[in-house]
Image (cartoon, rainbow, N blue to C red):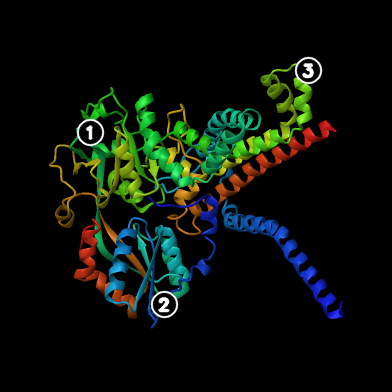
C-alpha cells in the first residue's frame, strides 16, 4: 500500500466522520435556530409592556378589534387541551387494542395486510383528514346528534384520534413484540389465559414502550394544524359541550399569520403562541423521558 | 381552500424569501413581474397573469397568495413589485415603505367585489337587513335563533350558526366596518373560516348556517340573500349591476399596492389590467369590473 493511498483513506475517513457528525449536530442547530427565530420575533412585545397575564388568563381573543384589541389565549389553550384529550380518550384504547391484536392474536396474512393498511392510514395528508371532517363527518354529526353545526370539538377529536391511531399502533406493537417469548411461555405454563397474559404480563413488561406510544400520539395530536383548523369550526370560545365549535393554538397561527401586518403586535403575539406550543411539547417530551427513565431504574 | 401547511411550516415560511427565486424588477428592464398578497384576489391575479403571458410571452408574471399582510411585507422588503390586498394598508406599513424607499405606496383600485350573504339552500329566508346581520354577528347580539327572523327550519327552533372569516382577513375587517360598525366586535363563537371558499362550503353542509363571502364563490348548494340597508326598505340582490351602481350595500374595492409610481413593465401590466382585456377577466372571475 502506497503512502498516497493511505493518506487518501485517512482523509476519506475524516471526511465521512465530519459529515456524520454534522448530521448529528444539525438537529441541535436547527432547533436552536428555530428557538432564536421565534424568541427574536416575540421579544419586542415585552419591551413595549405586553400584558402577559391577560395573555394567559383571558378567554377573549380579539386581536384585530378596533374597540379594544385583546390577546387572551385561554380559550385557544382550552380548545387545544380539550380536543387532544378527547382524541386520546378515543385513540388510546383503539390503538393499544389494535397493537395487542396485531402482536398477540393476528397471524400470517391477516397481520401483514393489517399492518400495511395501518401504515397507509399514517400517510394520509392532514388536509385530506380535515376535508373528511368538513365534508363527511360534519353532516353525519348533524344528522346523528342534531347539533346545529357539524364542525366542532367532537369532529376534531374523532379526526385527530384517527390520525394518532397509526402512530400508537406501530410503536405499541413494537413494544409488545420486544417482550421476550419466555415471559409468555412462563405465563402459559402457569395456566394463564390469553387475556391474563396480555393484561398481567405483557402490559407491565412493555410499560415504557406503550407509554412512549401514547405520548407520541399526544404529540401528534397537539401539533396537528390543518386538520383541526378545518374540523373544529375554529371559534375562539371555551367549549361547554362536545358539540361546541372550538379553536386551537396551532390553527390560530396557521389561519392568522398570513394576513397579519408584519411585525405588528398581532403578528408578534402569534409567535408568542408558538412559544407556548414549544413549552407544551417540551413538557410532554420531558414527562415522557422522565417516566420512561423512572420505569427503567425501577426495573433495575 | 388554501392549503396552508402546519404551523412550523408557517413559521419557516416567514424566513426571508431569499430562496423563492422571485426578485423585484422595480420597473427596470427585467421581464419578470412579481405579484403577491391577498387570498381573496388570488384567483383573479392568476387569471390576469396567465392571459398576459399568453399575449406577451416575453413577460412573466409570478403570482403568489399567502395573505394581504404577507404581500404588503414583501412589497416593503422589495421581493415583489405589486401587492394584492383586500384591506387598506396600516399606518405602520405605509411608514415602513416611506422610510425605506422615500416614496408613498400607491393604491390602485382594479375592480370591485360584492360581499354576498349566504344561507343553506334549504333555508326559506330570502332577504335580511344590515341591522339584523349586526345582531347575528355582533358581540351580545340579540338574534340567536332562526325563529327570531320568522324562519322555521326543520328540526325545531334552531340556533343560528354564524360563519365568517379569520380575524386577520380583509373580508373580516370589511364586514365588521360595514355591518357591525367600528365600535363593535364579533361574537366569540363566530366560526372563523380560513378562506372564501370554505365559508360557502360550510354553509352548504350546515342547515343552520349563515355566512358571508365574495359573490364569485356562489355555488348551487347555497342561497344568496338580498340585503336591505334597514328593515322594511327594499332588499337588493348582489349582482354586477347593483354593485356597479352602488345600490348593493356590501361592495368593496379590489386593491393593488405599488411602491410609488409604477414604471416600465409593471406600468404596462397595470394599464393592461385597467384595459378591456383585464376588466373582462375581473368579470369572468365573478368580481365587478370598474
Residue A65, percent across and down?
41, 47
Dot 3: chain letter: A
- Dot 2: few (<14), some (14–19), or many (≥20) neighbours within 10 Å? some
Query: Which is closer to the viewer, label 1 or label 3?
Result: 3
- Image marks 1 and 3: residues in contact by CB distance under 8 Å: no
Q: Using residue B229 as the reference point, say whether residue B101 is left or right of it.
A: right
Q: Secondary structure at mark 1?
A: loop
Of labels 2 and 1, earlier in sequence is 2
> What secondary structure is found at the residue carrying circle 2?
loop
Chain ID, mark 2: B
Is residue B277 found left or right of B82 in the rendered image? Answer: left
- Residue B289, how many percent across, how many down? 20, 62
Q: Nearer the viewer, residue A27 or A3?
A: A3
**Towards the viewer: A97 or A129:** A97
Callout 1: few (<14), some (14-19), or many (20+) C-alpha neighbours within 10 Å? some
Q: Which residue is mark 2?
A: B25
Chain designation of label 1: B
The x and y percentages for residue A167 are: 59, 40
Question: Badge 3 local density, few (<14 within 10 Å), some, or many (20+)?
Answer: few
| Residue located beneath label 3 in the image | A190
Q: Are marks 2 and 1 in contact (CB under 8 Å)?
A: no
Q: Position of residue B35 (x, y in %)?
A: 38, 67
Is residue B263 something one can see in this rendering? no
User: Residue tagged by mark 1?
Assistant: B123
Q: Is residue A147 visible?
A: yes
Quadrant where the image shows the C terminus of chain B: bottom left
Amino acid at each position: 500500500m502506497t503512502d498516497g493511498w493511505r493518506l487518501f483513506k485517512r482523509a476519506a475517513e475524516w471526511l465521512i466522520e465530519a459529515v456524520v457528525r454534522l448530521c448529528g449536530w444539525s438537529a441541535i442547530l436547527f432547533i436552536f435556530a428555530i428557538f432564536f427565530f421565534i424568541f427574536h420575533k416575540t421579544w419586542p412585545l415585552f419591551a413595549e409592556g405586553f400584558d402577559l397575564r391577560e395573555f394567559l388568563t383571558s378567554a377573549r381573543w380579539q386581536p384585530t378589534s378596533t374597540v379594544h384589541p385583546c390577546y387572551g389565549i385561554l380559550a385557544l389553550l382550552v380548545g387545544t387541551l380539550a380536543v387532544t384529550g378527547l382524541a386520546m380518550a378515543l385513540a388510546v384504547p383503539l390503538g393499544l387494542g389494535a397493537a395487542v391484536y396485531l402482536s398477540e392474536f393476528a397471524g400470517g396474512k391477516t397481520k401483514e395486510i393489517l399492518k400495511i393498511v395501518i401504515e397507509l392510514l399514517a400517510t394520509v395528508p392532514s388536509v385530506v383528514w380535515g376535508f373528511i371532517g368538513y365534508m363527511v363527518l360534519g353532516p353525519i354529526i348533524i344528522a346523528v346528534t342534531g347539533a346545529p353545526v357539524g364542525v366542532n370539538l367532537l369532529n376534531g377529536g374523532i379526526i385527530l384520534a384517527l390520525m394518532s391511531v397509526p402512530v400508537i399502533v406501530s410503536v405499541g406493537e413494537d413494544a409488545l413484540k420486544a417482550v421476550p417469548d419466555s415471559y409468555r411461555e412462563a405465563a402459559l405454563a402457569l395456566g394463564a389465559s390469553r387475556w391474563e397474559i396480555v393484561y398481567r404480563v405483557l402490559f407491565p413488561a412493555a410499560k415504557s414502550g406503550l407509554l412512549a406510544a401514547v405520548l407520541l400520539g399526544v404529540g401528534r395530536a397537539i401539533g396537528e394544524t390543518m386538520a383541526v383548523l378545518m374540523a373544529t369550526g375554529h371559534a375562539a370560545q371555551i367549549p361547554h359541550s362536545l358539540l361546541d365549535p372550538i379553536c386551537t393554538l396551532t390553527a390560530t397561527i396557521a389561519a392568522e399569520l398570513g394576513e397579519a401586518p408584519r411585525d405588528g403586535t398581532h403578528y408578534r403575539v402569534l409567535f408568542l403562541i408558538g412559544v407556548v406550543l414549544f413549552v407544551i411539547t417540551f413538557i410532554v417530551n420531558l414527562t415522557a423521558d422522565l417516566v420512561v427513565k423512572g420505569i427503567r431504574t425501577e426495573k433495575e | 381552500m388554501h392549503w396552508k401547511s402546519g404551523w412550523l411550516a408557517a413559521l419557516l415560511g416567514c424566513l426571508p424569501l431569499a430562496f423563492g427565486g422571485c426578485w423585484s424588477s422595480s420597473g427596470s428592464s427585467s421581464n419578470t413581474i412579481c405579484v403577491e398578497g391577498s387570498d381573496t384576489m388570488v384567483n383573479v391575479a392568476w387569471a390576469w397573469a396567465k392571459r398576459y403571458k399568453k399575449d406577451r410571452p416575453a413577460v412573466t408574471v409570478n403570482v403568489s397568495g399567502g395573505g394581504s399582510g404577507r404581500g404588503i411585507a414583501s412589497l416593503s422588503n422589495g421581493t415583489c413589485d405589486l401587492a394584492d390586498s383586500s384591506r387598506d394598508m396600516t399606518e405602520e406599513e405605509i411608514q415602513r415603505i416611506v422610510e425605506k424607499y422615500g416614496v408613498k405606496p400607491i393604491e390602485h383600485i382594479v375592480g370591485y367585489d360584492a360581499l354576498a350573504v349566504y344561507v343553506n339552500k334549504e333555508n326559506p329566508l330570502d332577504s335580511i337587513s344590515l341591522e339584523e346581520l349586526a345582531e347575528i354577528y355582533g358581540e351580545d347580539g340579540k338574534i340567536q335563533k332562526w325563529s327570531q327572523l320568522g324562519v322555521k327550519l326543520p328540526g325545531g327552533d334552531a340556533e343560528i350558526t354564524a360563519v365568517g372569516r379569520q380575524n386577520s382577513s380583509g373580508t373580516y375587517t370589511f364586514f365588521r366596518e360595514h355591518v357591525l360598525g367600528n365600535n363593535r366586535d364579533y361574537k366569540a363563537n363566530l366560526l372563523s373560516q380560513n378562506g372564501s371558499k370554505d365559508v360557502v362550503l360550510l354553509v352548504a353542509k350546515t342547515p343552520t348556517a349563515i355566512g358571508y363571502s365574495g359573490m364569485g364563490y356562489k355555488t348551487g348548494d347555497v342561497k344568496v340573500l338580498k340585503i336591505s340597508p334597514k328593515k322594511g326598505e327594499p332588499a337588493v340582490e348582489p349582482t354586477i349591476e347593483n354593485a356597479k351602481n352602488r345600490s348593493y350595500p356590501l361592495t368593496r374595492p379590489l386593491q393593488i399596492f405599488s411602491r410609488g409610481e409604477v414604471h416600465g413593465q409593471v406600468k404596462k401590466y397595470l394599464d393592461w389590467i385597467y384595459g378591456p382585456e383585464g376588466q373582462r377577466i375581473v368579470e369572468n372571475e365573478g368580481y365587478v369590473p370598474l
